[in-house]
Image (cartoon, rainbow, N blue to C red):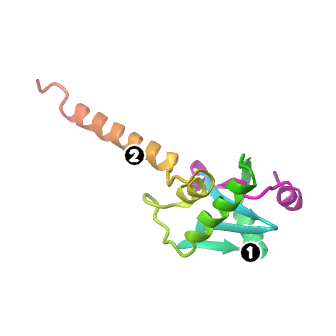
Amino acid sequence: MTNYLQLINGLQPIDVIVAKKKSGLGRILDHYIVHLGNGVFIGNLKGSVKQVFHSELLELLQEYEPVKIRRFNGNHFQVQHAIIRARQKLGHKYSFLGFNCEHFANWVQYGKESSNQVKNGLWIAAGLVTIQIIASNDGER
């Protein structure tokens, strides 16, 4: 997915662009931006939920590589409600654990603020702590 115009022209309202950083540790995380339709994008980035203009999107695509499009499978009524949900969050502050770009995209598409990346990260952290506790208590029974 390298051609910007091809990417933009293929989007429907409430589709989500899923992207990864092109390099560095940030490649392990997915980043999400919602297409509201008519070339209007909205995302939870740079501190809060805001509209992303074409120039900003082009700038983001210099650093991030779209890896997939998460299609919205709703009817016209559901699209309108999703647009309302997206606009309700304009200005909402970014929080890595509490309300990140994945929370926002899921809120818009599904009406639920959730982030599998955060859940998985917390499970991994809990597992590592458990392993550390077991390893430090090894032989003490």
Q: Nearer the viewer, residue 59 or 74?
A: 74
Identify the secondary structure beneath mark 2: helix
Q: Is 138 above or below relative to 36?
A: above
Disc ID at residue 53: 1
Residue 129: name its quadrant.
top left
The residue positioned 60% from the left and 56% from the top of the image is 105
Residue 107: x, y in percent? 56, 56
Q: What residue type is disc 1 on?
A: Phe
The residue positioned 80% from the left and 68% from the top of the image is 39
Q: Badge 2: few (under 14), some or many (20 or more) residues near its Cα, within 10 Å?
A: few
Disc ID at residue 122: 2
| Range covered by the magenta-colored residues | 1-29
Residue 15: name its quadrant.
bottom right
The residue positioned 76% from the left and 58% from the top of the image is 13
Image-based side of 40 in relation to 140, left or right: right
Q: Is 103 above or below relative to 90?
A: above
